Image (spheres, grey):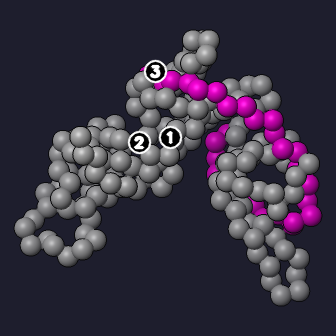
Amino acid sequence: MITPNDFREGLIFESNGRKYQVITYQHHRKSQARAKVQCKLRDMDSGSIVEEAYNSSEKFREVDVRKRDFQFLYSEGDTFHFMDQENYEQSTLKREQIGDQARFMTDNMDVIGVFFDGVFRTVEVPPNITVEISSAEPGFKGDSVSNLLKNAVTANGITVRVPLFIKEGDRIKVDTRSGEYVGRVVD
């Protein structure tokens, strides 16, 4: 059994028959009141995001989580196809099971398959991915104030705020947790 004091990002636990993954958590304490843990959680069955506050004395069952290497093959509508790197079996997941990370996936990308209670439930994408810019707003001469950003669209359809010097055809690194520009990839 675990308590909210044991929470960490990515932890999966069971509460009232539902499985939740911790996205963010923060400890709160108001003067004489008991400590509470404010959490942002993803419901692993429906994919919805919920916010909960738990007393630090509550107890939950930690879900048995196993991870294996998978390869994302392709998507058809809201169905994503994966191949297990160990036994080459193919599996599918719905977009709701993958959540927001689905927008970062590209064909033949290596991902981590997450199993809990013996069932393939979701995937984790790498923390950073390299993508090519397919269209970008032009940067104008004289726009030299630091930290100016413009919108750019990547080859897989993600809109990212990038510095003015990034142009079409450039390859950039994107943080999959925040969706933000990390840096330019120089070949």
Q: Are marks 1 and 2 in contact (CB under 8 Å)?
A: yes
Depth check: give the residue in front, 161 or 175.
175
The amino acid at mark 1 is Pro
Task: Say which residue label 3 marks.
Answer: 73
Q: Point out residue 29 in the picture as x, y percentages from the top left corner.
A: 80, 79
Horizontal side of 62 relative to 66 (left or right) equals right
Q: Point out residue 129 in the picture as x, y percentages from the top left corner.
A: 41, 42
> Looking at the picture, does residue 90 appear above or below residue 134?
above
> Looking at the picture, does residue 83 appear above or below residue 166?
above
Q: Main secondary structure of the magenta part?
A: strand
Task: Say which residue label 2 marks.
Answer: 129
Q: Residues within 10 Å of mark 1 (few under 14, many from 20)?
A: some
In the rendered image, the quadrant that contains the C terminus is top left
Can you see residue 133? no
- Span shown in magenta: 46-74
Q: Nearer the viewer, mark 3 or mark 1?
A: 1
Task: Tell me the residue at 24%/74% (across/down).
Answer: 146
